[in-house]
Amino acid sequence: MANITFSSPLHKDKTVYAVAGSHKQTILEIAKENHIPIDFGCGNGECGTCLVKVFSIDRKKRMAHPLTEHETKVLKEMGKITQAQIDQMRVDDLMPTEWRLACQMVMRDEDIIVEYPSR
């Protein structure tokens, strides 16, 4: 099991357990199942509404889960990632940014913190 702590300035932090190894559930799906109010629009990585920051539990390393094509395009359009960072990510296989789209990031076997905005 992996722990996900959802953190927001307007809501109490909530830690939930995700099934480790399934590699199928997105952060958004887990949030919805646990009544965590992450905003989303399209749900397929095109609008950027579900933008979140993701850190490893110790906040020292960036997640090693690759960006999807949709995420790469939207994050670049939003100014959250540069082409140089994208190119480096493809070489290093490391996350170049803490910014992710909750509807695209698939849960891995690691404990994480997901910071999301609140209204």
Image (cartoon, rainbow, N blue to C red):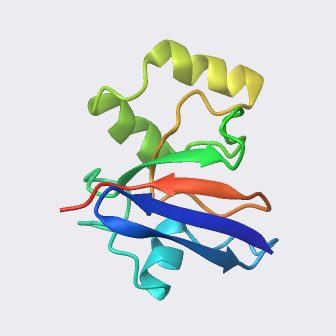
Q: Position of residue 17 (x, y in %)?
A: 69, 78
Residue at 30% in and 53% down? 46
The outermost residue toward the front is: 12
Q: Reply above or below: 70 against 13.
A: above
State the quadrant of the N terminus: bottom right
Q: Nearer the viewer, residue 46 or 63?
A: 63
Q: Position of residue 29 (x, y in %)?
A: 49, 77
Q: Position of residue 99 (x, y in %)?
A: 46, 40
**Which of the 4 image quadrants contains residue 79?**
top left
Q: Reply above or below: 109 against 33.
A: above
**Which of the 4 image quadrants contains residue 24?**
bottom right
Residue at 55% in and 68% down? 26
> Is residue 35 toward the left or the right of residue 39 in the image?
right
Q: Position of residue 94 (x, y in %)?
A: 71, 31
Residue at 43% in and 19% down? 82
Residue at 58% in and 64% down? 5
> Is residue 106 toward the left or the right of residue 99 in the image?
right
Q: Nearer the viewer, residue 69 or 22?
A: 22
The outermost residue toward the top is: 84
> Is residue 61 toward the left or the right of residue 16 in the image?
right
Q: Nearer the viewer, residue 96 or 38?
A: 38
Q: Reply above or below: 81 against 47.
A: above
State the quadrant of the C terminus: bottom left
Q: How many marks?
A: 0
